[in-house]
Image (cartoon, rainbow, N blue to C red):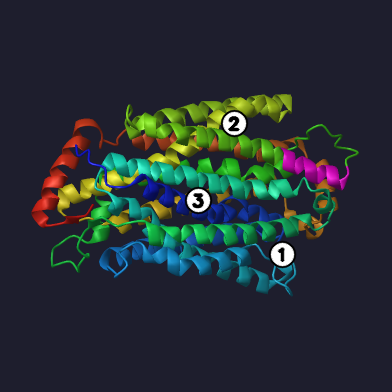
Amino acid sequence: MEQKKYVPRKESVIYAVAALGQGLVYSCMSSYITDFYMNVLMLSAWFVILLMLLARVWDAVNDPLMGLIVDRHMTRWGRMRPYPVFTAIPIAILTILMFTHPIGFEHGSQSTGLYIYVAAVYVLWGMIYTASDVPFWSLPNVMTPNPAERGNIISYGRTVGGIGSAVTVALPIILGFIPMLAKREDFNSIKYPIMAITMAAIGMPLFVMSSFKVKERVVHPNATKRAPGEPSSLSRIFHCKPLMLVVLTGVLSFGRYMLQSAAPHVARYGGFYMGIDKETMTVEQYTGNLSKIQMIIQICTAVGMFGAMIFLPKLFKKFEYRTLMIVSCFGGFVASVVTLLVGWYTKNLLFCIPFFIISAIPLGVINNVSGAMVFDCIDFMEWKTGYRDNALGSACQSFVNKLGNAFATVMIIAMYLIVKIDPQEIAGGKAQEMMEFAKNMGSAQNFGMYALISIVPGISLLLCAIPMLFYDIVGDKKKKITEELAIQRKERGIVISD
């Protein structure tokens, strides 16, 4: 297996910092869009479900299309690098608009215009984000031909990008501890625009660094129109069994997103109160309690996720990707069951801290390892067919991530419907009305919402480990692919610069 290192440490760091910028913005959507739609804009639950699912249907076309565009066009600046520059400003603007209640539109079902606005902004944000995400996460594929080095670049990028996610998640929670904001009746409405503006202003300048400081060393010829009888790029993707197993694993692991995205819902409706009397609490105490609950969940999630990410580069040297996926997912499932039992019967989330942390470990493992496995699958396809579809393969990862987030959102909203919580009945999303509603909820409703960060993600993790049992790009087979692929590339005249 080729051991030569191609990427200077400084370049790897810059790529990771760019991932940090992207993480700051992406986490706004993935962590808080459901709470904003349901409990601030008071949109219909069925509308949000349909929006998420229909947007993913469009992504099934949009993401592969973006992959094909990137693979077929080499610009004078490179194949991947131009896209972050051209998409950064539109993404920043759309992120702010996504978390803004437009002037002149009433809340919820009273305003058809609001629904049109929300749908247009959400779908357009997804399209522009795809135009940056697919090329950006394809970059490690052309930065180095060394699979081990490539895996480390992805791992560092995902780890530092995860820090961006943690910062975004923390900001609305921190705002809840500021007395002058926490007392406001419209606190829910103002905290999200503050978050979006801050993250967009910081994140997008960092993101565009990848366009100027990262080098594309592995130069493949442009993908061409297929000859008669030749399989299409999409056909090669769908006939790659290892890649389809990774995709299936990604889809089934949608529950990993729920520890973060469901946290504000559990804080609001889970029935947990930290050191205050539910019957006599004030609006300020209620707002502070929401922040405390979210903080416990999010800190535990961050510790488990980043702890796994930090140790992954060392674990890569000792264990196969497949093994890391299976072990972490099974451990996460067991921890989620314990989290459910301990949290519900003690009514104290502090006792759940170690189990929250363990159940969050698969977040770090899946986020990092699945990307490296996708690139191994692209190596496998090139070895088998002589064609390399870098961006199209990465588009599968982008689509799966967005699909997983959508499924997580659907599960959250479905729980609202199952336990019969309708935020539209809470007048205008004001803190006083929401507090009174939460105080009078039944235990079945509290239990259903708590399940969103315990047993529901756990079942998802257990299911996603099953496809990994059949993934076989490991050991001697992986080594053989890498060695023979290096020979094939020399024969085809593929350029690899230093």
**Residue 87 seen by the camera:** yes
Q: What type is the residue that disc 2 sits on? A: Phe
Coordinates of residue 18 in the picture (x, y in percent): 46, 54
Circle 2 residue: 356
Q: How far across and down, in percent of the image, does residue 434 sit?
A: 80, 50
Residue 149, placed above or below residue 106 = above
Q: In the rendered image of this protein, does residue 339 appear above or below residue 268?
A: above
Relative image position of residue 95 (x, y in whole percent): 58, 63
* Residue found at the very far right of the displayed protein: 280
Q: CA distance from mark 2 to mark 1?
A: 34 Å
Name the secondary structure under disc 3: helix
210 or 307, which lies in front? 210
What residue did someone put label 1 on? 108
Left/right of residue 399 with respect to residue 484 in the rendered view: right
| Residue bearing the label numbered 3 | 20
- Mark 3 vs mark 2, foreground winner is 3
- Write down the region rendered in magenta: 282-292
Give the amino acid type for the residue marked by disc 3 in the picture. Answer: Leu
In the figure, is residue 379 to the left or right of 337?
left
Please tell me which residue is depicted at 44% across the width and 59% down the height of the picture.
209
